[in-house]
Every structure is written in C-alpha cells, then in structure tokens.
Amino acid sequence: MTSCHIAGEPIQKVAIFGGTHGNELTGVFLVKHWLENGAEIQRTGLEVKPFITNPRAVKKCTRYIDCDLNRIFDLENLGKKMSEDLPYEVRRAQEINHLFGPKDSEDSYDIIFDLHNTTSNMGCTLILEDSRNNFLIQMFHYIKTSLAPLPCCVYLIEHPSLKYATTRSIAKYPVGIEVGPQPQGVLRADILDQMRKMIKHALDFIHHFNEGKEFPPCAIEVYKIIEKVDYPRDENGEIAAVVHPNLQDQDWKPLHPGDPMFLTLDGKTIPLGGDCTVYPVFVNEAAYYEKKEAFAKTTKLTLNAKSIRCSLH
Amino acid sequence: MCSLPVPREPLRRVAVTGGTHGNEMSGICLAQHWLQAPAELQRPSFSAVPVLANPAAIAGCRRYVDHDLNRTFTSCFLNSRPTPDDPYEVTRARELNQLLGPKASGRAFDFVLDLHNTTANVGTCLISKSSHEVFAMHLCRHLQLQYPELSCQVFLYQRSGEESYNLDSVAKNGLGLELGPQPQGVLRADIFSRMRTLVATVLDFIELFNQGTAFPAFEMEAYRPVGVVDFPRTEAGNLAGTVHPQLQDRDFQPLQPGAPIFQMFSGEDLLYEGESTVYPVFINEAAYYEKGVAFVQTEKFTFTVPAMPAPIPAPSPAS
C-alpha cells in the first residue's frame, strides 16, 4: 500500500468565531457559553479560542453596523490607515487581523471556524474556499461521515469573481459553518444542537490528526458556485416576483431548465432558462435581498484528497 | 353579556395596512402592489385603501425606527402635544390617527385590517381586541368556515383594564391577520398567497354584510393571554437557554405542568411550573426577545357571539 501522504504540521491555534453577523444567534450564544465554560471545546494539546467578532452588531441584534464584516477581509481594507472615519467593521476587521492574523503570514491562526445561520433551508453546511486543500477536504469528509445520517453539504465558494473576503480567511485553514433554516434574531434548540455537533466532530478530527492518525485518501461531493440570480425587479427596482413555491426550501436539490423559479405578483411562473441542471443554495436568504441574490446556482462535483498525517509522528 | 354596538350601516371606509412592522414582508409587498394596482381591493359597495404604515422602518427593513408602532396608538401618545424630539413612530401614529381615526370618534374608519407576520409557528392567527367585538367575531367565523384546512385560531389580546395600543384599534372595527412562521425580511410565496386570499375574503365578507346579510348567533372558541414567560437568563440578563425542542413550533397546543419549556446551554431542561394547562402562543418570536417574552400563555375559552342584523342601507348621496 502506497504511503504517499501529505505530512502536515500539528495544528496548534484554533479559533471559533460567533457573531460575525450579529443577528445569527447560534454562533453568538455558543461562543458566549464557551467563553464562560469552555470545557466542551478543549482538546489536549490544542488552544481553542472562542471569540465574538462583531460585538456592536451583536448588541443591536443586527447583521452589521456600517458594512458586512464578512466581506471586507481583503488586503486593501486591512491595510487602510486607521481612523475614526473608517466604517466600524473595517476598524474591527483590522483589530481581528491583528489578533488572529495577520492574513497570509506565518503567525496567523491555523484554523478559524466561523459560525453562521441562514434563513434558507440548507441544513448543516460546511463552506470551503480552496478546492485543493487536502487537510480541509479530509476534515469535511470526517465531519460528514460522523454526522450521518444527518445530512451535511459542502459549498465551495472558489470562483474568480464571486469569492468573497471572509473573516475566517485570515487563517491558514478557513472553515465556514452555516446552519439553517433559522430566522434572524431567533435561537432554535435543534439548530444549536446541530452546530454544536459539527464543531465537536471538527475538533475531534484535529485532535486525531495531532495524535498521529493517518487519514487515507478520500473523496467528497461538493457544490461549487457558478453564479448568483437576482429577483426579477420592476422599473423602480422593486422586487416583482417571489421565489416560486416549488423552489422554496429546496436548497441542494436539482433544478432543471424549465422548472419553476419565480412567481410574479400577477401569478405568472418564470422558469429556469439555459440548458444545465443546477443546484440552488441560499434560496431566499433574508440578508441577500439587499445583495440582489435570490439564490446561488451551483454545480455538483467531486473533490479528492490525498492521505494526510501529522508530521511529528 | 355586554357587546359593543354592531355597525348599523354598510361599511364604506375600509383600509388594509401593511408594514406596521417594517420587516414583516407579506403585508409590505401586498400594500406596495395594491398602491400600483388597487383593483383587487375594490368591491361594488366600497373600495379598501391600502396603506404602508411605517415607511421609514420598511425602507430600513427593520421592525421600527425608534418605537414599536403597534404599541403607540394609546391616547397618551396620540393626544400629547407634538415636539421636535418625538420618536418617529409617535409622529407617524398621530398621522395614521388623523388618516384612519381619530380613535374613538365618529369620524374613524369603519374597518382596518392590519397585516403581520411572525417567526412563531402560529399558522393563520386572527387577532382581535376582545369577544365583545361582534363584527370582528362574525368575520373570524366566516374565515374559519371558508378555510377549514387553515385551522384559523382566534387570539383576543385585550387584558382587562388595559387600553388598546395597536394600529387597528383606531378604527371602529378592526382585525389583525398574523401569519407564520416566516423569518423577518423574507417573503415566502406560500404565506404571501395565503395572506392575499384571506384579505380578499375579508373584503368579500364586508361586501356580503353591506349587501344586507344578517348573521346568526354562534359559539366561538378563542385564546386570551393570561401571562407571559421570559427566557431563562443569566444575572447579566443574557440568554441562558432557549425554547425546548418539545415546545418549539407547538403554538396553540396544550402545555401541561411538568412539561419541558427551555433547554439550557449547559444541557438541562427547565420544566413548566404553572398549575394548570395553558396554550402557548408566539413561541420564539424574534421581536419578543427584547420584550422579555419567550412565549405568551393563553387560556382557551368559549363564548356566545350574538346575532348580527343586516345593516340599514344608507340614504343615497344625492340628498
């Protein structure tokens, strides 16, 4: 049996972010709970730091104060000269970069888990930013297998123009954890339980890796973003059609050309055009109305990871 | 039993309000649509006026700007002298009172239907002041009979001694339509379509009444609040747990003493310690966290609604 594997350094510094969007409550309350009592997230040899990223938005129970914190961790924003005139989130991003980064440097945290909720019916979702990251593909494979039969899908946001500069991107291994459906400003016990399990399995994986376990080659199915679809709008820019009842709540399910997509206020159905089956995600996410996104089209593909083993063993 | 006077003449001045809370999307979208295309609100004997109740909150997609508009229609807010520092919603409530009221006067609108959504699993909930609102009770009965599959529940909000504070209380008769669950800021096609159909049926009922229909007495079952229960909190006032999975989504179902109601972050269950069965409503409504309400405890009761005679046709306008 070939022992061609990637030898990685042990993972040392891990952070768990909550409240990047102040009204996505599961992460807020998990992090607040772990700040009081962190036993659940400790593993031997590992430093796991829970952290509230946008405290002012959390206090107001709003997504953000001036601008979306999860879109501005690009080098331009991180490098701006600090001043009171900068939007609150840009100043906060620089503080976070200082504490957990700097982005693209040797000193940055190894792994950051960023906890989110969505109003879309996406269930447990893991968000991947790099299709060639063996370590994270292995981690995601482990989490999915451990959660089964509870479904857990992987959303790949690698794309030349649609990829966005997330809070977690300052880490060497950024992991997005998204669980829905949950309304903004609501904390559901079932959703809390699911997110808690995802974190538990993720930390168990890291612990096993650090202890020298070899993870054989594996493959996972992922959904890769192709494009975003806006709502049909009228001349004034107002929304002129609703997500069709047949598409509502059908995240991750195939949508074929000709299938209903939107329903106008006059009762007309607007079908999916083109000639490809797509897999919609973030269907009817509340926060995306202003970003002009009714849903994102994805394509299904398989990613392979080589075997990995921690290099200290 | 003391009932309030029923309308003796046809109802002519009718309004449908959306966006009393700026992030409850079904009513907002409907009112915006009707402002462009009002034909749907027209009936032979009257036309309902669509109103966007809280434009600034709607623009910001938030529940309110300074103060919950649907708590602002008390005489204290409506009748005190305006000042430049007044909260936005106080000023707006006075404007709406001028447009649709004045509250408790002979000039007030005949009927206001106020459209709402909730994150709680209330299904189709009809909200009226009390069992003495005879016209509203007959209307609720009509909706229940037209749509048995919806299981419309009637919620009577007024507590004794308390003045009404919500928008539809400025008119002579009113009803709140509360549909859930729907997240704030989200427009679901199924909920939107159901609300649109219910509004049409309300207007159809008013037309039926106006055309000279009498309605017989009947027995009605409804829910009225007997208290509220807050989330478990830490000393600092932060949440220490949330609604238990066995209570979540079970609006209008009986809650027995000893049943779990909260799940703490540390894992244990908190049990309901009341002495009798209650019917929780508005379980885990996002907007009620800041009001200290995890759910409203209600009691179920039955009462007789007296017959409602047909209206006397009004004299022709030419005289």
Image (tube, grey):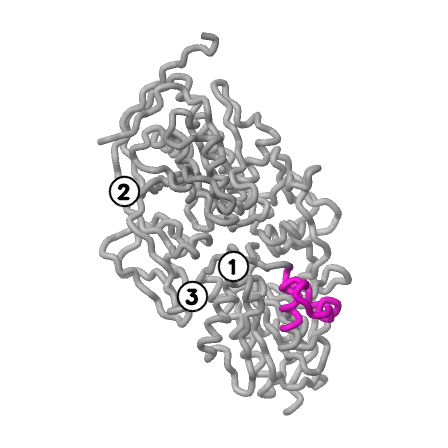
Q: Position of residue A308 (x, y in %)?
A: 67, 82
Q: Viewer-proximal residue, A31 or A247? A: A31
The x, y position of residue A196, in whole percent, is 49, 70
Please, what is the three-letter code of the amino acid marked with disc 2? Ser
Q: Give the class, few, some or many, for how many residues have Cα within 10 Å of label 3's Cα (few <14, many ≥20).
A: few
Looking at the image, is B71 positioned above or below residue A301? Answer: above
**Residue at disc 3, secondary structure:** loop
Name the subunit of mark 2: B
- Tell me if mark 1 has few (under 14), some (14-19) or many (20+) residues whose alpha carbon lies within 10 angstroms of its own: many
Quote the CA–CA distance across marks 1 and 3. Answer: 13 Å
Query: Distance from label 1 to label 2 (Cα)?
Result: 33 Å
Callout 1 amino acid: Cys
Q: Is residue A289 left or right of residue B106?
A: right
Q: Which residue is painted at 57% across and 58% down in the image?
A: A63
In the displayed structure image, the side of residue B227 where residue B168 appears, left or right? right
Alpha-carbon distance for marks 2 and 3?
31 Å
* B211 displayed left or right of A302: left
Does A121 lie within the magenta span? no
Say the numbered circle drawn on residue B238: 3
Which residue position holds label 1? A61
Q: Are the numbered discs 1 and 3 placed on the same chain, yes or no? A: no
Secondary-structure class at tag 2: loop
Determine which quarter of the picture holds residue B261: bottom left
Question: Mark 1 belongs to which subunit?
Answer: A
Q: Which residues are magenta?
A: A67-95
Residue A190 shows up from this direction: yes
Is residue B152 in sight in this rendering?
no
Picture coordinates of residue A234, whole percent (x, y): 68, 38
Residue that label 2 marks: B160
